[in-house]
Amino acid sequence: MGTGESPAEKDDESPFRSQSDYDATAMDIYEVVFGRWVVAPLRVLWSDYRGRFGLLLVTFYVLVGTVGVVVIPEPSVDPINRLLSPLEQPDLRYLLGSDGVGRGLLPLMAHATPKMLKMMLAGAIFGNTLGVVVGLVSGYTGGNTDKILMTVTDVVASIPALPLLLILAAIIEPRNPYLIGVILTVQAWAGLARGIRAQVLPLRNVEYVEASRTMGQSTSTVLMKQVLPDLLPLVTLRFMSTARSVIFASVGLYFLGLLPYTSANWGVVLNSAYENSNILASFENAHWLLVPALTIAMLTFGLTLLAQAFDQVFNPRVRARHEARKADVEEDIDETDIEEGGVSQLGFQQ
Amino acid sequence: MGYLRNRLLQAVITLYSIITLGFVFIRMMPGSPSAYLRAEIQQNPGAYGLPPNPTLEQINDVMQTQMNYTPGPIWEKYISYMQGAVQGDFGTSVIVDPGASNVQLILEAAPWTIFISSAGLVYGLVAGIVLGSLMAYYEGSKMDVGLTVSMLAASSVPYYIVAILLLFLFSYNLEWFPTGGRFNTNTTPGFNYPFIAGVFNHAALPILSGITIGFGGNALSLRANSIRLLGEEHIRNAELRGLSTYTISTRYLARNAILPMYTGIVLGLAGLIGGSIILEEIFVYRGMGKLMYDATVQRDFPLMTTSLIFTTVIFVAGTLIADFTYSLIDPRAEQSSMG
Amino acid sequence: MSESEFATGRPQENRDTVLEVRDATVTYEMGRGQARVLNEINLDIYRGETLGIVGESGSGKSMFASTLMDAVEEPGRLQGSITYYPDEGDPIDITELEGGDTKRLRWEEIALVSQGAMSSFNPTKPIRTHFEETLSAHNADKDEGMERARSIMRDLNLDPDAILDEYQHELSGGQRQRALVALGLLLEPDVLILDEPTAALDLLMQRSILRLLYTIKEEYDITLIVISHDLPVVSGFVDRLGVMYAFEFVELGETRDVMHEGAHPYTRALLRSTPNLAMAVDDIATIEGSSPDPINIPSGCSYSPRCPIADDRCTIEDPELIELEDDHDVACFYPDRARKELPVSLSEDDSE
């Protein structure tokens, strides 16, 4: 056996080796989790007209933000092709018409998309993580920690969002889309923290959680393994709505010119159309206004639809009712019997 | 009583925190606040009542009065700031309207904003309740599905986009409403028809845009509440007892479906006042939102923070009122919230 | 609870029918077919009796209760006839009534204390309002009505002055149940249907409610129909007992006969699965299998898939509910075999 091979050989018997065995099981778990939390919900989402439409809309924006920006040329000023109507020129750049300085609206919209997606992602991740952590710790630890955290949460939740964002944008003057996303959700986490805490409180004393606690598992392990999965529905739902509120706020602030910008942005295009009152005064150039407006509205609409559909996926009561509706009248027949009887045939045979 | 005391304490803590935060914000103004103001004064001494090319002392004098500028360590500045705040003195505007009291400026602008916001809120609520009831009544029908999707769309389209489209359609193209302002400048403010008609004419589009902030969500939650109630035993019991459809739909359904929305109304008002920043800028409507916008664009930090504090006060007071009055209209509240 | 505690013994000889149910069937159209949630029920309910209806969850008990008031919820369809014989005057076919007449019949003649007693009051209105609005909906005199309400409440051991001004959430479970019974008796009905009157109450409260109901029934001279999934509770209290399985009656007779000489395999299984003090824990059985889907009711006897003595005939032919002995009807081809082969282990000391 050569000396060169010995470290690997050693590794085979070392604890690291068994670690990799464990990884294999972890992969299995991951697969199960994936199946349960990704594939199954997607299927339910797809079965709901709102879910299907929302998923298509959001996927479309992700595609535009990734593939689209490669295919669609960057926007450039072109004095000859000013204020073209949509489809006026057989040119991809001017598919949706052009603005007052001859930039194609399609390139403008498309190339602003990646930045918006980054903002949404950063904001949704930051806002929700903070909300989950605060809510979990507060609800699980109780006592003075809980009191202090909830007081802070209440204070944050009492500050009107937009005025606060205005000041923060003015102080920080953020340019990085991820940073913008974080700033825009600096207040949004508070509602989630309250919601999570309310869900964790009753879980605290649920038997399996208590059992893990008495078995000496650390607080963080219990939280991660036992409590968090139960909270996933709420978090997913909030992920959509936070992403949506990031768009609301960022486009609004860009529109007001309160966020510094270097490249095209939906809000900025909207603003430039709004500023040209001669454009506003006729229907002829409505596309300059309508294209950015629809671009924004369709994404927010898609996210709303997804959130609604997720509510169906996760809310067992809604889902049960949904199924009962499908099976029609079972519920009407003996509602309380079903609740009390537990395994009555009517409620569960389907 | 413990509940009320807790709520009051919470309100006090919130107000204290936001006022302190205001102090921090003023300190955090890019460049130091004094440097910023100094530059402003040097650039435009006339606005501060100084002759061109003022001396250093003159500038310092003005700065002292302008910003509660107290020389000394930061905690002394904080104490003097808090002392002012307790007495309702939040300093003066430095750039938007140099020398004017911030509170004065806000109080002048606030009624206009409160007018359009509360009108938007009330109409949004009424529209939401009517549509939500219709949807619940015809649950599952084509109309319900259509309305549900429309309400989802209405609640997901940003209100400022609605505002711009309304402006585009009704002001610029159809010319039904003015493109900006609060009243007709050729009328005399007061209790006379031309003035009041002008006020409503100018407020119409801002109010209409404000309605879109809440009514979709209101309609959807009223629908959900009603449908949940329809399955409940006391509704069926009332039917069996022979109560009229009218009694059931008003006393049993509508009342109990609207109740849970009550505390949300305050949130709605806060959203509207926050949203007024964008709406008033779009409609060039000189209210609190426009004031905040101007303060931000011109980096008038004292005015900005005072506006933030002021909107927080409105929100906190509104929440308190909602909390305290809710137990008056819903007998169940007392038990659940006091416990 | 022992069965003889309240039972008045054998019903009077000259029985007088108050409700006559003929071929009552309730169907729902569903995407995957027609659901029959009540299957050709034939039953006479006698004036002044206490009739118990038992069955497991989803056997159609509550549907039967709604049917008696012609209050089947949309989109359900009720076929057959239900005839109400008032004290005086001509019999009325309830299913033929329209609008105002239905309203008058409900609550004035037949009242229902529904199973959701815990949420049967409008949570944001005091109890008093429920009494007042019921009186005004039926154009009854308010002062007289409220005086009657007070007296009923006193009979039910409720303090009217306290209870009337309370809200639902301020009452205990037992108080709510009794307040609901008082509301049911407000318009002096002939028939009072109690759907799971004891479901959400503790044992002590169950007993005291039943005792009260018994006194009330005697005092107000009403017919009581008690629907329950709890055979031991009901059997101690009713004159006759009907056992429902899969949307129809499988056995009907005097309580004593059904309890001691139950002839339907399902009844016997129910009795065997009922815990009682004299029984060893090991003897308590559960009923194998589950009751059928309202869309795919098995051909032949609907209990045959679960029945230990079923044979080929049972899976092809559906047994009718026929009189086995006096006032004891059974829907089974082999009542004697059931009695012989299926023990109930109901201890004899419990019988008297």
Image: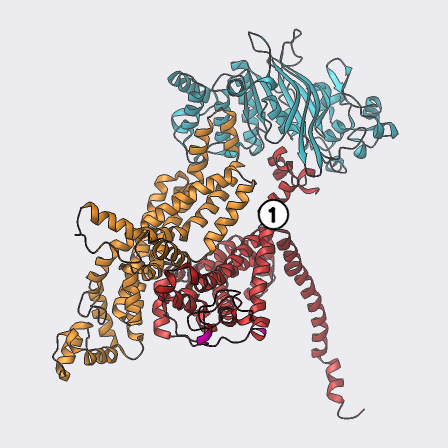
Residue lying at 56% horizontally and 62% vertically, measured from the top left: A58
Q: What chain is the red one? A: A
Look at the image and tell me in which quarter the C terminus of chain A lies. Answer: top right
Look at the image and tell me in which quarter the N terminus of chain A lies. Answer: bottom right
Residue lying at 53% horizontally and 65% vertically, measured from the top left: A87
Q: What chain is the cyan one? A: C
Does residue B100 belong to the magenta stretch?
Answer: no
State the residue lying farthest toward the right. C312
Mark 1 secondary-structure assignment: helix
Q: Is residue A317 shown above or below B275? A: above
Residue B142 location (% of width, % of height):
56, 42
Q: Is residue B336 visible?
A: no
Residue C81 lies in what quarter of the image? top right
Q: Amino acid at mark 1?
A: Arg
Q: Is residue A66 shown left or right of residue B123? A: right
Q: Which residues are magenta?
A: A71-80
Residue B192 location (% of width, % of height):
18, 46
Q: Is residue C157 shown above or below B134? A: above
Q: Is residue A316 shown above or below B242? A: below
Q: Is residue B96 shown above or below A315? A: below
Q: What subunit carries mark 1?
A: A
Q: Is residue C318 shown left or right of residue B278? A: right
Residue C30 lies in what quarter of the image? top right
Q: Is residue B22 shown left or right of residue C192? A: left
Q: Could you say which is closer to the camera, residue B283 or residue C162?
A: B283
Q: Could you say which is closer to the camera, residue C327 or residue A91?
A: A91
Which colour represents chain B? Answer: orange
Type of secondary structure dominating the magenta stretch: loop
Residue A66 location (% of width, % of height):
58, 72
* Residue identified by numbered label 1: A319
Does residue A72 belong to the magenta stretch?
Answer: yes
